[in-house]
Structure formats: structure tokens, C-alpha cells
Amino acid sequence: MAFVLAVTGSAVGLGNIWKFPYVTGQYGGAAFVLVYLACIVLIGLPVMMSEILMGRRGRRNPVATMALLGAEEGKSMNWSWLGAMGVIAGVLILSYYSVYGGYSVAYVVKILSGVFSDARAADVIAVRDSFEGSWVLVGLFHTIFMGVSIFVVARGVEGGLERAVRFMVPGLLLLLIILLGYSMNTGYFGAGMAFMFTPDFSKLTWEAVLAAMGQAFFTLSIGMGAVMAYGAYLPEETSITTSAAAVAIADTTIAITAGLVIFPLVFANGLNIDAGPSLVFITLPLAFGQMTGGTVFGTLFFVLLSFAAWTSAISLLEPAVAWVVEKYNRSRAEAAVLIGVAIWAIGLGTVLSFNVLKDVRFLRGTLYDNLDFLTINVMLPLSGLFIAIFAGWVMCRNSTAEELGGAGTSYRLWRVLVRYAAPIGILFVFLKAVGLLELS
Ligand code: PHE
């Protein structure tokens, strides 16, 4: 139970409430959502199970685990680079994740101040613009968020994390349901439903499919060694299949509910569906501003969102810290501060890309856009691909069957998915999206 809670804490975060709605908006809705759901079930879940079982077998940080497992299977210890790639992806993701974690903390303060009471869309957008335009403010909240995350990881993650997750996930769901009630009364609930569930596949590009796959990895926290690092603490007798399924269900429920809350609000207020990263920081304050009791619910909501982001951030920090502790024999506190400050510094790039460096654009756009694309659409799919290859082809049947509790039906299904569906699917989508594969 503790493990399921910790992994749920890692999985449920900004990915569900901030990122899922905004990428769904950018990539056109229902077709994207369906591909995303298919990716969760067919690729995400089997890869997640693989990552957990590898972590439990290795019982070390991801880099050392991969070297150990490679050796144990009589293959190369050089598989450690896969662990390293995960750790690096985690570091880069946390650098901007922390900036948005800071946003949710800042919005607690803003809601409390009452600026959103009875605000119109234009007012809410102005509040967002003035916040985003100030590198001092965005940087300040990024610093607070990162500081608190470093503090927890430095002290060791156990006790508090579990307690946080126990009230956070049900709390978030409850508040989302209250918001759902509000959305249903806007008169645009049908439009929101249609946007999310009536697919038009003709508009689906390969890049959108790749983004849906990346989002599936991101939201389940896989491909970064986070789940692997937590798997290292998992007792032998716990079922990996059941735990992974429980996490995936909780995570998906929250994301879909968030979408159902947000899209009706977008339509009802004539907002831009592809507003990008700050979409929820416009729609939700608007709703809270108009609701009775909005200040209370709104404060509660952003507090819970900050907590959710925080439990995810901790799990993003953990693999790199575990690696420094084990490899360089540092204390946890030292390692957490060292890595944390480095990540904070990288994050300043994202902070500045919203204001001072807003017009510095290359490749995919701003610095943040590039980091986002590199991590979500390149690093995560690649590391997911190699995790699947490792669990499905490098590890022998006996090793994986032992971890997954025998060779029953669910084991066989997992093995087919992880050997064929996941690697072929990931590779195909990846090559299509980057234009290396042309089929007529
Ligand atoms: N899954 C988290 C979210 O959806 C983000 C995360 C990714 C956390 C990877 C840990 C590792 O917000």
C-alpha cells in the first residue's frame, strides 16, 4: 500500500491537471485523447511494470541497477547508460516542472488575495501576463518550490510522503468533481465532451501521436528512473501487476476529469483552446472567481495541486540523488543540495524564457519549448523503448516471471506487449514523427 501511494504521488501531478489539458488543446482534442489512452494501456502499463520489476531486482539507483541486471543476465554492464539517460531526463524535466510547481504555489496566494473574484476572462489573462512577465516573481516561486523539494529529499522521503498522498489524491478528485458540477452548468459541457471524445482522425498528425505517447510516459512517471528507484524499496510479496494497474487507473481518472472541467470553461469564456502551458492558470481561476465559495475551493485546489506537484518533484529528484549518494559516497543531504541547486539553475532558463528571453527562438521555439520537446518527445520514448527491449528481450523468462508472480495469463499478455507492441509501436511512431520513415 505504501508503495502504491508513493508511486501514485509520483504519477499524479502537474502532468494530469496542467499538462494533459493543454497538450490536448494544442493537438486538437478527441483523437489525441484516444491515442493517449491506447498508449497508457498498451505501452505505458507494460513499461511501468517493467520498470518496477527491474528496480526491485536491482535494488539500487537506476544506473547501478541497470549495470547489475545486465551482468546478471550474462549481458553487458553497459546497460547502465539507460539508467543514466533516465536520470538525466528526470533532471531536465524537474528543471521546468519546478517552475510550474512555483506557478501553483503563486496561485494559492493570488486566489487568497481575491484578485479573481468576479473577474472576466480578460482580467484573469492580465493577471497571468503580469505574473509571467516578471522574471523576479516567477523565479521567486520556482526557488520556493525547488527549495521545499530539496528539503524533503535531503531528509529522506518515507513518512511524510505517504501521509501527503493519502489526502491529496482523494482531495484533488473531490475538488475536481465540485468543479465538474460548475462546468456542467456553463451550458458548454456538451461542447467540452465532444471536444474530448468525438475524434476526427483526419486531423491527427504523427507529431500528435508522438506527443500523446510522450504524455503517457510523462504522466505515469516512467522512463526517468523514478518508478525504478521506488521499485527498489518494494517488498517481494507485493503484486507489481496490481499496483501498476491501480496507479494507472487513478492517474487516468484525474487527467480525464481535469479535461472535462477545463474544456467547457474554455468554450464558455471564448478562450483560446491552444493557449499552451498557462491554460489551467486561466480557466480555473476564472471558474473559482465566479463560484460561490470560490475563494475557499480555489485556495484548497491550488494547495492540493502544489502538493501533487511536490510529491512528483520529489520522485524526479530521488534517482539522481540516490545515484550521487551511492556512487560518490555523499550524505543524502549533501547530494540533495548539490543536485537540487544544479536543477534550480537550469530552471532559471525556463523562468527567463517567459519574459526576458521570450523572443529568443530556435528550433521548436523558446528554450522551454525545446526542453519540453527534447524530454517528452525524444528522451522518454527512447528510454521507454529500451526499457521494453531490456525487460522483454534481454532479461530471461525466468527472471521476469519470478518478479511478476508466475507465468499465468497476465504474465503472457505482459510479455507480448513488452516484446512486440511496445517496442514496435514506439519505434514506428518515433520514426514517423521525426520524418525518418515514409510509407505511402
Ligand atoms: N507524473 C508526474 C506528473 O504527471 C510527473 C513526473 C514525471 C514525476 C516523471 C516523476 C517522474 O505530474
Image (cartoon, grey):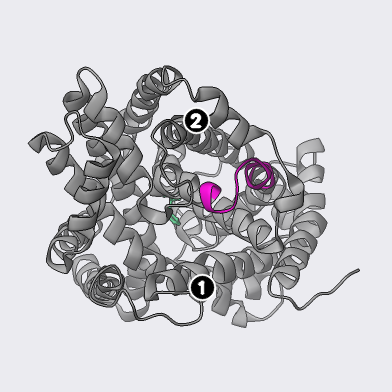
> Which residue corresponds to the image point at 75% horizontal and 69% vertical from the top-left?
432
**Residue 50 against residue 134 in the figure, above or below:** above
Residue at x-position 17% and y-position 63%? 143
Camera-side mark, 2 or 1: 2
Q: Describe residue 70's horizontal placement relative to residue 300 as left or right.
A: right
Prevailing secondary structure class for the magenta stretch in the rendered image: helix
- Quadrant containing the C terminus in the rendered view: bottom right
What's the residue type where badge 2 is placed?
Leu
Residue at 72 percent of width and 47 percent of height: 42
Q: Position of residue 380 (x, y in %)?
A: 56, 65
Q: CA distance from mark 2 to mark 1?
A: 28 Å
**Label number found at residue 330:** none
The three-letter amino acid code for the residue at tag 1 is Leu
In percent of width and height, residue 119 lies at 21, 34
Left or right? Give the position of 3 relative to 132: right
- Residue beneath disc 2: 260
Residue underneath mark 1? 374
Q: Is residue 363 magenta?
A: no
The answer to whether residue 301 of the structure is visible from this angle is yes
Choose between 155 and 353: the one closer to the eye.
Answer: 353
- Magenta highlight on residue 28: yes
Q: Quadrant of the N terminus?
A: top left
- In primary-sequence order, the first of circles 2 and 1 is 2
Query: Looking at this rendering, what residue extends furthest in the left direction?
Result: 113
**Can you give x and y, in whole percent of width and height, for residue 36 in the image?**
64, 47
- 368 and 57: which one is in front? 368
The residue sitting at 52% across, 47% down in the picture is 25
Query: Residues in magenta?
Result: 24-37
